[in-house]
Image (cartoon, rainbow, N blue to C red):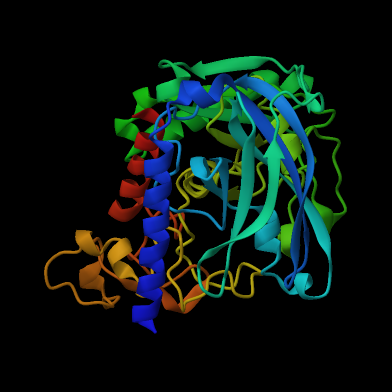
Amino acid sequence: MKRIMSLLAFLLMSWVNLSQLQANTLPYEKLFTNDRLRIDLIFCGNAQQEDVYLAGYQHESIWSGPKTGLVEPYGYGNYVYELYLGETCVFSKGFNSLFQEWTTTAEAQTVDKAMTTSLWIPYPKTELRLVVYRRSSQDGLLYSLFETTIDPNSKLIRHGAQQNWPIYTVQEKGDPENHVDLVFVAEGYSKDDMEKFRADCHRFAENLFAMAPYDQHRDDFNIWAVEAVSEESGTDLPHQDIWKQTVLNTHFYTFYSDRYLTVPDQTLAASLAANVPCDALYVIVNTDIYGGGGIYNYYGLSMSDGKYSAEVFVHEFGHSFANLGDEYYDNSVTYEEFFNARIEPHVPNLTSLVNFESKWKDMLPENCPVPTPQVPENEGKLGVYEGGGYMARGLYRPWMDCRMKTNRAPAYCPVCQRAIVRMIEHYTR
């Protein structure tokens, strides 16, 4: 079985590499303008059935993503969206979504739901075909889920600003084209709270750049802040019957988990970044209640204050920016089977050993036992330790206690650091 799964993984990576080769043969300027297009979709269904519908298009400001290597190189994400010119793939990017997470809960077995997701692409000069793929939890392969043709001259593409909130510069280090453009969005900050929001943004930036490997890459980041004003301060606490009038309608108790804080309407969050270069979207929620969430190429968010605000921010940004998986395996989440241990997970810091060669096998010290015993003498040593991805058995993590596992961990492990650096380089080189 492992040999079959390894072959499937090889074929998938061969497909990704071929897509990259095809995309890189066409210059950016031939296909795209310097602006970007937001594609708003509605994902709906349940644990057994998923459908996608087009909600609309929005012309937005500058495209700040890479202009070379337009196919994301790592094969991350439970979804991948691609643009085709004829049969040639000219753009590809992976992402995760709140809807996909919900489909792994018990509720999705008996209830139908719909959730929004917005995708960003460079604004095309010619008609291109958009295909959205979903990764099967059974075999790990990508299957077509939605397809449409994008006509850049369509009169139904909305132009003009949807949002006009002021943009505050936290730090500007250079051209958005070759920098990571991180956007902080204010949530639950009233007009009188805006000075606090700016201070929180600077504090979050310092928390980020105090942590390896970001400490060596500060000059690779621009950081912008969207000063979105809410009527009330704070966020919703449904399990306590507390409801606030805020710009993004964030709430705790997502999937009935007290500490899971999310934006239910991702398109609304994406629209707040319409007027600013954006490679990574992070919502700072004006509360000191413990909680947050991070979803790859979707958004990250967490509480602004509290004892562990720095730790939670860096953890959630690891999810949303670099697709790092959770390395803990307690019962604090409501997912029933988030990962399938019979296939290799698409996150870089977890393995099922089905295709360990694609993960951190090249980093292991000589004669390292696999699996690696979780004994005190292995503390601070790279290995293959069982437990991670909400599963005590069948999945393995690289470090005894990493930033992606607990708030006690002082740093990301070497595997997570390598994944972060690779993502930074994707946006900057």
Q: Residue at x 61, y 68 (%)?
A: 332
Residue positioned most to the bottom: 1
The residue nearer to you, when weighing 106 against 275, is: 275
When the figure is inspected, residue 243 is found, relative to residue 28, above or below; the finding is below
Q: Residue furthest front?
A: 86
Relative vertical location of residue 394 with respect to residue 232 in this rendering, above or below: below
Q: Give percent across and percent down for residue 335.
A: 64, 70
Q: State the quadrant of the C terminus.
A: top left
Q: Position of residue 232 (x, y in %)?
A: 83, 31
Q: Is residue 186 left or right of residue 73?
A: right
| Residue sitting at x 53%, y 70% | 339
Q: Is residue 107 visible?
A: yes
The spot of residue 396 in percent (x, y) is 38, 71
Query: Which quadrant of the figure has residue 125?
Result: top right
* Residue at the (21%, 60%) spot, across then down: 362
Q: Quadrant of the N terminus?
A: bottom left
Q: Quadrant of residue 271?
A: top right
185 and 424: which one is in front? 424
Q: Closest to the observer: 311 or 425?
A: 425
Q: Quadrant of residue 142?
A: bottom right
